[in-house]
Structure formats: structure tokens, C-alpha cells
Amino acid sequence: MMPEKNCSLCSLCEFRTKIVMPDGNYDSDVVFVGEAPGESEDLIGRPFVGRSGKLLERIMNEEGIRRSDVLITNTVKCRPPGNRDPTKEEMDACRPFLDHELSGRKVIVGLGRSACRDLIGYEGKMSEIVNKETTITVNGKESVFIPTYHPAACIYSRGSIAELKRTMNTIKNRYLG
Ligand code: URA
């Protein structure tokens, strides 16, 4: 299940260049959920290819994970203007596509606040929940959910990088064998 090429389920369609669909391995047990496409992603049509994507990929690689080992997606598939946070209405409009991408995975990694707001309804500080595993049910199927920092939040924070590395280490050792 995926959006139509000319999808207009929410107003983000007015601003986008390309719809940004998931990237990586559709058969993986592991999915990473970011917030929304940024400028580079909107132009290229692939998630996490800009500055925060490069940092994410570096940290993944340092822990022995390649992009092709996991599925990488976002709460919404179109870029919000000025890179603002996606609204609840926008996330809700895109949710059926996300649910389809998530359902049946062993583990879902929520990268940052918007993913955690969308998937577990969490509105507090990321520092309170980072790397605390819980479970969520998507389309009637249970998955482990791991909240962690968004790579953009790690650009100037060594502490956040350490937590994101810890997430990647858990994924590599426990879920990618
Ligand atoms: N930030 C995100 O959350 N997703 C992307 O695809 C790129 C940057």
C-alpha cells in the first residue's frame, strides 16, 4: 500500500517536489522511522540523504549496519514547508502507509520526537525514554518499539550520539544477528 503519485490526502502535497517512499530492505525485521523528508530528500525522493542522513548512516556503519539491512521511512512522505514538524493531521493522513510499512516487523526504531509522538503518543522529553524498549501493536501485530534520538539532534551533542550508537548496537546484536 502506497500513496498515489498525485496524492493529495493532506496539504503537504502543495509544497512537495517528490513523494519520499521508504528505502532499504522491505524484507528486514527492522524499520527506522524518521520525522519527514527535508530539502535534499524532497529533491531526490529518498529518505535520509541530507546532513542528518549522512550522520545516521555513519553511526549505523560504525555499528556494522548497512542501509540495505533495514527499512528506512518517515512519519510523513512529503516535506513540510521550512522543515517544520508535521502536524497530527498530516501524520494521520499518511498513517495507513506507515502502518503498512511497520506491520509485522520485529522491531521499530522511532528516530526522534515526531516518530514517538505519532507511534506511542509521547509528548515529553526524549531523554526520559531514549532506548527504553516498549511494545506497540500495528495492524494487530506486536512489535518491539525503541525510542531514540533523531540524528539531527545529535549533530551538536556527543551524549545524544552515544545514545543513538547504543540503539544501533542493540539492533545489530539483537535483531540483525
Ligand atoms: N529527517 C528525517 O526525519 N527524515 C528524512 O528523511 C530526512 C531528514
Image (cartoon, rainbow, N blue to C red):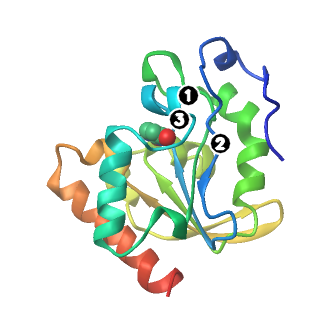
Residue 77 falls left or right of residue 9: left
At x 32% / y 74%, what residue is drawn? Answer: 63
Front: mark 1 or 3: 3
The percent position of residue 86, horizontal first and vertical second, equals 55, 28
Category of crowding for the residue at label 1, using alpha-carbon neighbours closer than 10 angstroms: few (below 14), some (14–19), many (at least 20): many
Task: Assign a secondary structure to mark 1.
Answer: loop
Residue 36 is tagged as 3
Residue beneath disc 1: 86
Residue 12 is tagged as none
Q: Earlier in the sequence, mark 1 or mark 2?
A: 2
Residue 21 is tagged as 2
Residue 127 falls left or right of residue 3: left
Label 3, ligand 1: CB separation under 8 Å: yes
Q: Observer-nearest residue: 27 or 147? A: 27
The percent position of residue 127, horizontal first and vertical second, equals 31, 54
Q: Are marks 1 and 2 in contact (CB under 8 Å)?
A: no
Query: Does residue 49 lie above or below 70 as drawn?
Result: above
> As shown in the figure, which amino acid type bears the numbered disc 3?
Ala
At x 60% / y 19%, what residue is drawn? Answer: 16
At x 24% / y 58%, what residue is drawn? Answer: 161
Q: Earlier in the sequence, mark 3 or mark 2?
A: 2
